[in-house]
Image: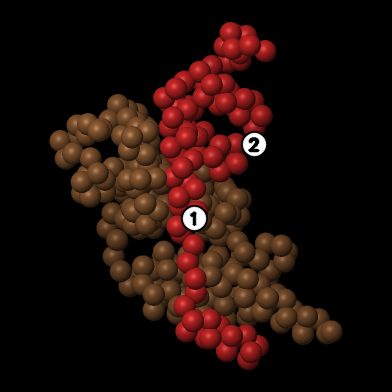
Chain colours: A brown, B red
Amino acid sequence: MTDAKETKTWFSQQVEENMDSLYSVAFRLTKNRSDAEDIVAESVIKAWTSIDKLENRNRFRPWVFRILHNHFISGYRKQSIRPTESSYDETSGNENKEEISSLLIKEPDEFLHWWANPERTLTNTLLGEDIMTAIETLPESFRTTIILVNVEGLSYDDAAIAMNVPPGTVRSRMKRGRTLLQKALWAHAKDAGLIKSDNKREQTA
Amino acid sequence: MNDETDKNEIEQIDCMEAIDNMYAYLDDELTDEDTLLKFKQHLKHCDSCYTRSEIEGVISERIKSSGKGKAPEALQNRLHDILGKL
């Protein structure tokens, strides 16, 4: 097999294996099926035309996610305005300590009792789709980080490659993103009537 | 090493520091052995952080199992078409 043919075969195999992952990440970024399909198709074409720049084939996944993420940032994200994004930007150097301390610290009794109560287990009250809905409310940088690490199983180093940031930023984004997710879940639980709106824990039967 | 020895011989970390390391721990990214040991010791002696860690672990599992999607057939066909023309 010639090198060129071997490369095509290998590339096609990688795309086949990562098709679902690419779509999943694109969908979480764009929140739109049609846009997600376009961004995946265009990213695959871009990846093929840039294949010579991939130095280590073992890093295909973070590399192709990076192409997809860059494509989203340079094109699709510009189409929408997300004013809340800047307030969460870790590059601002103005980390909110209260936010980092998390709801678990701020409201330990209510939160821990509700989540840890064996009579109202997490599995019974909060479905995976509830959590994914809450993730969709997060600012894009945190949403992307959580999806790449927790859904796609990328290491912090690989997620850093995918998002073109230092590994330390991935760690920071995970911490802040998951902290924000707690708050979003807490709000969702209130809205869904899983806990009383006055913050008092429901009595268990 | 018993619990008392653990408390005495290993430098303690507080809850804030434990939470600071919690997600890296859950993501198998807490690789510094000294930090990992201190974190585990903290969980051993702090019911609150232990519970938090358990809860966050459940959320991580739930995200992992729920976040996966399947590429729509139209996209699969579109990609196959692209790959066929390489």
**Residue nearer the viewer, A57 or A33:** A33
* One can see residue A85 in this view: no
Residue shown at 33%/72% (left/top)? A79
Residue shown at 23%/40% (left/top)? A195
Q: Quarter of the image holding residue B56?
A: top left
Circle 1 packing at 10 Å, graded few (<14), some (14-19), many (20+), is some
As shown in the figure, which amino acid type bears the numbered disc 1? Answer: Ser
- The residue singled out by tag 2 in the image is B31
On screen, residue A182 versus residue A192, left or right, reads: right
Residue shown at 34%/57% (left/top)? A133
Q: Which mark is residue B65?
A: 1
Q: Nearer the viewer, mark 1 or mark 2?
A: 1
* One can see residue B17 in this view: yes
As shown in the figure, which amino acid type bears the numbered disc 2? Answer: Thr
Q: Is residue A2 above or below residue B17?
A: below
**Residue nearer the viewer, A204 or A11:** A204
Dot 1 or dot 2: first in sequence order is 2
Q: Quarter of the image holding residue B47?
A: top left
Q: Which element is circle 2 on?
A: loop
Residue shown at 56%/37% (left/top)? B25
| Residue A107: x %, y % from top left | 28, 30
Q: Is residue A201 above or below residue A146?
A: above
On screen, residue B6 versus residue B59, left or right, reads: right
